[in-house]
Image: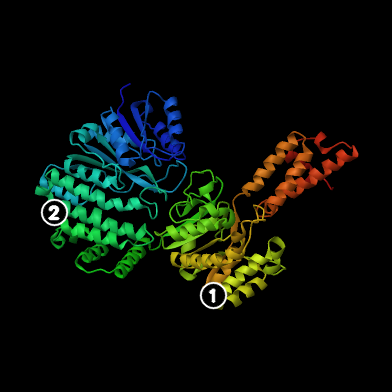
Amino acid sequence: MDKLISIIIPCYNVEKYIDRCFDSLLAQTIGFDKLEIIMIDDCSTDRTWDKMTAIEASHPESVMIIHCDENGHQGRARNIGLQYASAPYVGYVDSDDWIEPDMYEKLYQKMTEHQCDIVMCQNWRDTALSGQILAPKLTGDANRLLEIDTVEKRKIFIACGSIGYGAWDKLFTRDFLVQNDIFFPEGLAYEDHFFATLLYFYAKRVYILEERLYHYYINPASTVLSPNATHHFNILTVDKLMWEECENRGFLTEYRKEVEYQFLTLCYLAAMKMISLRLTHVPYDFFLELKEETLKRVPDYHSNPYIKDYVTELNQMLLQLLDLPISEQDLNAVCNAIRIKHTKGSLQIYVMTHVSFDVPQDPIYHPLHVGRALKEDLGYPGDDSGDNISSLNMYYSELTGLYWAWKNVRNTEYIGLCHYRRYFLNQDNRLMSKADFMPILEKYDVILSQPVASEQCYRDIYAEAHNIHDLEVVGEAIAALYPDCAPIFEEVLAGNKLYCGNLFVTTKTLFDDYAEWLFSIFAVAEKHIDVSTYDDYHKRVYGFLSEQLLYVWVRYRNLTHYEAPIGFTQEKAETRTLKEQLAALFRERRIKEAHALFLETMRARPDVMLPGSDFGQELETILHIIQICLEDEKQGRPSMLEHSTDLNELIRQYTKSPH
């Protein structure tokens, strides 16, 4: 069957996402047999190529895979894909995204009905890891056909940015792209700026469908969102190329003011937003170059007719910086103001994990794979990008996630940490949403977990479970660095309130203050803490030490705090694994090995039997069953195993008996 649509998918290190993307294409109601899927591996370093090979082998009539020997970024991969496209219509899909089942059927229907060059749909900004379908799809605006058949219409079409600047939410006729030589710059990020700008000068008929059919995955590790990545500086390079291309194609003659306006918005204003939200340290030299290049092309930006009507008040103020002598200190203040403006009211909760889990569908929750630098990738964004200490996770536990968020997260006003199985609960004992968090954060500085009351003081509890020397060293570091905090530290140690898990929510400003305070203390303390003789569990010393230090910091900063209940969504992964291993040994009647495994696990991970780890306290029951079976064997009596080798059944029998 002849193919109707060629779908071009650039792929780079997406082994964890590519199946979701492909499954959404496989489910297209237009008919998968009408699609030509062209997947280009941009020199991946993970198992992406293996995944692509398997997909092609399963669907040889519809899937073509291409391997690049060197990385050329999405621009080159998309250009290569278009060279191989044979269908009359072309779509682009990013490999970590996915689409609604009827997306291409609806785009194709409008394309053929109205004889368009481009049909565009709307999108979801989606944080989910599953290919879920959201509702409502309709935006509430009316669908519309744009006929750009005069110079004046095209000027408005360009200035309004009517079809955005993405490639992935559109369907094109192949002839439109090829005959007008519409392509992507290669080896650069922000390549969509160049490609989409050309669309505005050639499109004659465009249909805008006001229906959300594309899921744009908010991946913190993606090209656009990754913090402190050097490729962010490509934005100026790409937009300079865009200007040169417009000049070479003669667009400046008829549309100079429109091209100037595009450069001001796509390059200068977008770059100002980028350095404010994506970079920890504001690059003053880059700003000076950006300013120089902008004024070179748009020296009389004040007279541009579109600024008054289309540029926001904040961006008009940013344009005024082009006329002023801005110091590095001034630039930092401006970027901080931009960050506050763009992040006002935003909240991100990072869910720290070292195992696969069911990620909450609420968009405020973001999975973060802690310790990913030395572990198998789980498919979640990890703490090993940007400035990080991911490789020290064996000592710092979830604090490697805290460190990463401190150094790399910029685009939120409020931030919080929780665990893959431990979350803050609202008054209805449900997972807290943004609507639950925000009223509390408006009244209090910090949200902490409800403490556990103990009959012993914290110092004695720590001494029983860990090496008290380490806690004393931390106290000495606090006394040396923050003398006013030392009495508070001692008072907290003498108290009986236990704060567990390093769960909290606060402003990003206070979050950063806590992280700087905490890691400055550990930088001194770690010189006097020797973990060389500790087992794997106790090596996580800094994670254990920090749990109570969070409350010390709150007291030290004299912050108001709200204590919220914590709910567990599942048992600890190590607890579940132990139960599964024991069950397998019971089925094979290998009770002595089950006993040895139990004791070995308890030595390595004593936390597996805690109430928050083992919800039903079944491990204690299993231990009793093992001991009974061993004693029966020793005495030559019939064993419980004669009745059943199913561990769950044995647990039921044991709990019913009077023992």
Looking at the image, which is closer to me, 55 or 432? Answer: 55
* Residue 537, quarter of picture: bottom right
Do labels 1 and 2 touch, CB within 8 Å?
Answer: no
Q: Is residue 581 left or right of residue 524?
A: right
Element assignment for label 2 = helix
Q: Which residue is mark 1?
A: 482
Looking at the image, which is closer to me, 574 or 478? Answer: 478
Q: Which residue corresponds to the image point at 17% horizontal and 47% vertical from the top-left?
A: 244
Q: Which residue is mark 2?
A: 257
Element assignment for label 1 = loop
Q: Amino acid at mark 2?
A: Lys
* First reached walking from the N terminus: tag 1 or tag 2: 2
Q: Amino acid at mark 1?
A: Tyr
Q: Is residue 449 visible?
A: no
* Residue 500, quarter of picture: bottom right
Looking at the image, which is closer to me, 461 or 497? Answer: 461
Quadrant where the N terminus sits is top left
Q: Is residue 655 left or right of residue 614?
A: right
Q: Which residue corresponds to the image point at 67% horizontal and 68% vertical from the top-left?
A: 458
Across and down, in percent, residue 645 comes to 76, 35
| 1 vs 2, front mark | 1
Across and down, in percent, residue 642 comes to 82, 34
Does 620 appear above or below 17? below
Across and down, in percent, residue 209 comes to 28, 42
Distance in Å between CA atoms under marks 1 and 2: 58 Å
Disc sitting over residue 190 in the figure: none
Q: Is residue 499 left or right of residue 465?
A: left
Across and down, in percent, residue 198 comes to 20, 43
Residue count near mark 2 (Cα–Cα under 10 Å), binned few <14, some 14–19, many ≥20: some
Q: Which residue corresponds to the image point at 67% horizontal and 56% vertical from the top-left?
A: 533
